[in-house]
Amino acid sequence: MPLFEIHNWPSSNELLKVAAWGKSGLQTKFDDRSAQQMTALLLEALLSKPYFKLKLENTLLSEPELIRFKHQLNRIYDGEALQYVTSKAHFFDLELFVAPGVLIPRPETEELVVLAESLSPKNARIIDLGTGSGCIALALKHRNHGMEVLAADVSPEALSIAQKNKKQLSLDLELFQFDMLSEEKLPGKFNAILSNPPYIPEHEKRDMPAHVTNQEPALALFVPNEDPLLFYKALSRLARQYLLPNGVLVVEIHEDFAQDVKGTFLDIGLSEVKIHKDLQGKDRMVSAVNG
Ligand SMILES: C[S@@+](CC[C@H](N)C(=O)[O-])C[C@H]1O[C@@H](n2cnc3c(N)ncnc32)[C@H](O)[C@@H]1O
């Protein structure tokens, strides 16, 4: 049964009334604060204006806008992620298009970008492997215009979403299909290779929230239980082959595998291997130097 019955409408089409109506519906499932935040974010996305402005103007919603809002509230109530409902996710100050073909960018991945910047020369040639929405590569290019940034993914769906984001943000980025687990060749050498690869062992799926496992692509999340380091082994081989001397490999990791990833990188001959914590104090990134 949908949350908002077809005959149940707000008492008026003024924004404040519509917002109160939306919030009260979501409060039947979520706590007050979440209901409030989600209502505001939905209205912001729907009407393409900051919520404080909409409130100040007490904007009037048209009938099609009200119908869309009601439909979106029902999707949220049914457990869909807000970012997929609005088709928008924020990464640094970029607004990215997202759809269920790509992972919703996580805030901790911004820390990977900052770390990579601190370890790379200003005009570095950098590649992001497993780019998904393109968040890492696009943020890097947006923040460092002098860098040459390339990005690749095995998923055609992810590539078309990254392409859309590249166009929307007017950023210069070379995008192409590439399978990290194959013997395919990369175009030239790099000062840095970055990746936030799939790293969650399949057995953890049962403990994860349904909105993640049901909606986000399994290809972006999971690795086989028997080989959780699969992508880090591939990335370390690629680093030895395609990093310039003193080039860096910077990866996001599962907090439980920091020492194993470090060991994998040392085994192949990378040096200065370091584990970095995220802002929550969890082991979240590993960097290594080809030299
Ligand atoms: C954890 S997601 C990261 C997405 C994005 N970089 C981010 O941080 O939000 C991992 C990405 O790796 C891609 N991927 C999975 N297997 C791959 C492979 N064999 N080669 C290249 N990319 C792969 C997935 O399609 C997905 O986009």
Image (tube, rainbow, N blue to C red):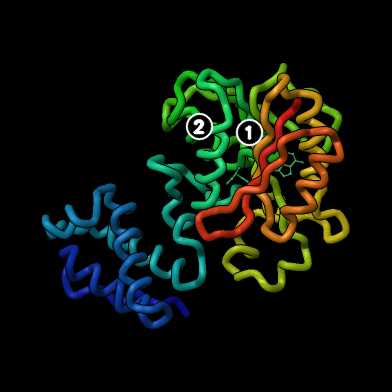
Quarter in which the C terminus is drawn: top right
Residue 24 in sight: yes
Q: Which residue is mark 2?
A: 140
Q: Position of residue 44 (x, y in %)?
A: 29, 54
Whether pointer 1 and pointer 2 mark residues with C-beta atoms closer than 8 Å, the reply is yes
Q: Position of residue 73 (x, y in %)?
A: 39, 68
Q: Amino acid at mark 2?
A: Leu
For residue 90, the mark is none
Q: Which residue is mark 1?
A: 128
Q: Amino acid at mark 1?
A: Asp
Residue at the farthest front position: 272
Seen from the viewer's position, the closer of residues 274 and 82 is 274
Q: Position of residue 15 (x, y in %)?
A: 19, 63
Seen from the viewer's position, the closer of residues 276 and 82 is 276
Label 1 vs 2, first from the N-terminus = 1
Residue 156 in sight: no
User: How many other residues sit within 10 Å of disc 2, few (<14), some (14-19) or many (≥20)?
Assistant: many
Whether the residue under disc 1 has CB within 8 Å of ligand 1: yes
Q: Position of residue 162 (x, y in %)?
A: 55, 36
Seen from the viewer's position, the closer of residues 189 and 12 is 189
